[in-house]
C-alpha cells in the first residue's frame, strides 16, 4: 500500500476512481486528490470502491466529493463479469429490476454475483447501488427544486426511511442540510462530469458533431446536444467542455491538477432517469478512460509519437444507445459520413413532445427496433440487401440481443456476424462504439488505410494488423487517431 499512500500524499488525481481511502481518526473517506491535510499512514485504510468505504462506516468527505470521482478505468474497459456488472449497476439496472434482474442479464446466480463483486469491490451489488442512489439523491437535492420525498423515490429508494438512513450513512448528515435556497426549479439539471486529464475536446466533440442526425442531435458553437430514450421517458442533454480555469469543481468537490470536467445540462421527463442519463453521458464521452495509460502505449510507436504529443487525451466516442449505433454502422457501409446522415434522418420519426419540445433542442428520438420494423420500404433510401440487414438487426435486438455496457463482447460479436449482411467491419464498428471495446481496429476501412498511409504505416490490412499488435490493448484509440490522420 506504499504506492497508494504516495498518491494520497501528493494528491495525485490520476488515482481518483482507482481507490478510495478512509481516515480512522475522522471517520471520513476521500479520493486520493483530496486537498485536506494528509493523514498519518497508520490512520489510513484503502478501499476498492466508495460503497466499500461506506459499508465500513466511513462518511463521504464534503470537500473532495469522493462519490463523484471519475469511474475506475478498469471497470470501464474490462470485459469480464465484474466489469459488466459495475457498468450495468451504473446504468441503474438494480434500481429498476433489483439484483435478480442484474444476475439474469449477466447469466449468473445472485449468490455467485454477490461473491464476485464483494471480492473485487468490497461490496455486493445492493451496497453498490445504495451508494449510487445516495449520490443521485445528493445531486437532485443540490441541483433541483424537487421535494425530498420526490427525490427519495426518483433516486431509487424504496421508502423515505431507507432514503434518510442511507443518506446519513454515506454523508453523515440529514438530506435537508444540503438544500440550497437558490436551487433552480425550471426542470434543468446542471451537472459537471469529472474526468482524468488530458481530454482532447476538439477531437471528441468534432467526431460527434460530424455525425449528427437532423432532429436527433446537433453540434453548434462547441456544444453537443442530443435526445435520449431512457427507461422512464425522453430526455435531452447538452454537453460542452468547461472553460479553462472555470470556477467550481465537479459536484462541489475539489478539482485536482490532473482532472477536469464537462459541463452538462439535462432535461428529464422523469427524474428517476437521472442515474442512467449520467451514466450514458459519461459513456458517450469516454470520461472514465485513463488517457495516460493509453497515450503511453501509443506514443511508444514512432509512427504515432508526434501525433500523441500534439493531441494528448484523444477519447473513444461511444454511444447512448446500442441499437442506434448498430443502425448507424449498417447504414454507413460503403457510403460517406454525409450520405449516411441523410439516410439516417429519413428513418427517425418525430418525438411526441417531452422535455425536448422547446426551441433549439432536438425534437426527435431515434427509432426503436419496433418502430424501424414498422417503416415501409420507401423509408429506407438504400439497396434492398442493406434494408434486409437493418431489419434483421432490429429483429435480433427486439428478440433479446443486447448492445449495451453489460454485453458479453465476444458473444455479441458472434451473434452479429450470424446476421445477414453483417460482416467483420460492421460487427467491429458496433463493438468499438456501442460496446466500448478498447481494442478494436478496422483494418479494411478506407479511412483507416488512408490514415495509416499518411502516418507512414502499412496500409495493407494484413500488414497493418501485424503492426498494430504493439498497440494492444488500446487499438480502438489508435483507430480514432488514424481516422484523424486521414
Image: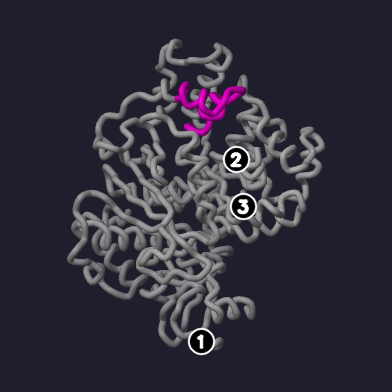
**On the rendered image, what quadrant is the N terminus found in?**
bottom right
Would residue 16 be seen by someone viewing this image from the given angle?
yes
Q: Nearer the viewer, residue 221 or 466?
A: 221
Per the image, the residue denoted by label 2 is 432
Would residue 350 appear left or right of 89 to someone viewing this image? Answer: left
Q: Is residue 111 left or right of residue 241?
A: right
Q: Is residue 27 left or right of residue 449?
A: left
Q: Earlier in the sequence, mark 1 or mark 3?
A: 1
Which callout, 1 or 2, points to the residue nearer the camera? Answer: 2
Give 327 or 56, whichever is nearer the viewer.
Answer: 327
The residue lying at 52 percent from left, 23 percent from top is 339
Task: Tell me the magenta residue range.
Answer: 323-344
CA gap, disc 3 to disc 2? 13 Å
Q: Is residue 326 magenta?
A: yes
Residue at left 44%, top 76%? 29
Q: Quadrant of the C terminus?
A: top right
| Picture disc at residue 78 | 3
- Mark nearer the viewer, 3 or 2: 2
Indicate whether residue 363 is drawn in magenta: no
Q: Secondary structure at mark 3?
A: loop
Give the secondary structure at mark 1.
helix
First-in-chain label (3 vs 2)? 3
* Disc marking residue 65: none
Q: CA distance from mark 1 to mark 3?
A: 32 Å
Mark positioned earlier in the residue sequence (1 or 2): 1
Amino acid at each position: 500500500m506504499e504506492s497508494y499512500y504516495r498518491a494520497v500524499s501528493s494528491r495525485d488525481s490520476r488515482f481518483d476512481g482507482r481507490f478510495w481511502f478512509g481516515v480512522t481518526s475522522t471517520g471520513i473517506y476521500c479520493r486520493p486528490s483530496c486537498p485536506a491535510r494528509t493523514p498519518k499512514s497508520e490512520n489510513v485504510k484503502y478501499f476498492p470502491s466508495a460503497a466499500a468505504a461506506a459499508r465500513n462506516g466511513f462518511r463521504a468527505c464534503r470537500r473532495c466529493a469522493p462519490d463523484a470521482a471519475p469511474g475506475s478505468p478498469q471497470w470501464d474497459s474490462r470485459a469480464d463479469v465484474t466489469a459488466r456488472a459495475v457498468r450495468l449497476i451504473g446504468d441503474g439496472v438494480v434500481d429498476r429490476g433489483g439484483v435478480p434482474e442484474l444476475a439474469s442479464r449477466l447469466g449468473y446466480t445472485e449468490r455467485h454475483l454477490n461473491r464476485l463483486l464483494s471480492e473485487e469491490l468490497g461490496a455486493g451489488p445492493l451496497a453498490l447501488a445504495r451508494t449510487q442512489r445516495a449520490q443521485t439523491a445528493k445531486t437532485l437535492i443540490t441541483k433541483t427544486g424537487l421535494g425530498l420525498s420526490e427525490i427519495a423515490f426518483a433516486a431509487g429508494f424504496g421508502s423515505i426511511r431507507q432514503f434518510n438512513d442511507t443518506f446519513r450513512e454515506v454523508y453523515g448528515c440529514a438530506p435537508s442540510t444540503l438544500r440550497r435556497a437558490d436551487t433552480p426549479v425550471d426542470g434543468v439539471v446542471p451537472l459537471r462530469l469529472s474526468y482524468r486529464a488530458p481530454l482532447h475536446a476538439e477531437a471528441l466533440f468534432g467526431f460527434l458533431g460530424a455525425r449528427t442526425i437532423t432532429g436527433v442531435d446537433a453540434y453548434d458553437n462547441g456544444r453537443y446536444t442530443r435526445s435520449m430514450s431512457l427507461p422512464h421517458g425522453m430526455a435531452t442533454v447538452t454537453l460542452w467542455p468547461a472553460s479553462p480555469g472555470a470556477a467550481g469543481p465537479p459536484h462541489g468537490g475539489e478539482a485536482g491538477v490532473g482532472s477536469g470536467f464537462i459541463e452538462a445540462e439535462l432535461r428529464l421527463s422523469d427524474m428517476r432517469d437521472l442515474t442512467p442519463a449520467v451514466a450514458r453521458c459519461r459513456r458517450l464521452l469516454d470520461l472514465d478512460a485513463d488517457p495516460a495509460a493509453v497515450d503511453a502505449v501509443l506514443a511508444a510507436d514512432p509512427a504515432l509519437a508526434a501525433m500523441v504529443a500534439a493531441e494528448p487525451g484523444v477519447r473513444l466516442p461511444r454511444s447512448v444507445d446500442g441499437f442506434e449505433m448498430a443502425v448507424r454502422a449498417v447504414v454507413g457501409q460503403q457510403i460517406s459520413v454525409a450520405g449516411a446522415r441523410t439516410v439516417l434522418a429519413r428513418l427517425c420519426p418525430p418525438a411526441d413532445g417531452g422535455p425536448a419540445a422547446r426551441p433549439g433542442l432536438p425534437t426527435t428520438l431515434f427509432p426503436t427496433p419496433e418502430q424501424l420494423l414498422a417503416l415501409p420500404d420507401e423509408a429506407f433510401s438504400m439497396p434492398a440487401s442493406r434494408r434486409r440487414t437493418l431489419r434483421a438487426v432490429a429483429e435480433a435486438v427486439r428478440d433479446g440481443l443486447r448492445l449495451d455496457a453489460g454485453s458479453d463482447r465476444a458473444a455479441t460479436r458472434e451473434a452479429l456476424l450470424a446476421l445477414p449482411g453483417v460482416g467483420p467491419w460492421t460487427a467491429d464498428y458496433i463493438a468499438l462504439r456501442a460496446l466500448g471495446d478498447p481494442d478494436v481496429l478496422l483494418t479494411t476501412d478506407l479511412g483507416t488505410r488512408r490514415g495509416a498511409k499518411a502516418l507512414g504505416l502499412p496500409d495493407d490490412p494484413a500488414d497493418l494488423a501485424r503492426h498494430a499488435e504493439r498497440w494492444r490493448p488500446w487499438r480502438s484509440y489508435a483507430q480514432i487517431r488514424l481516422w484523424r490522420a486521414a
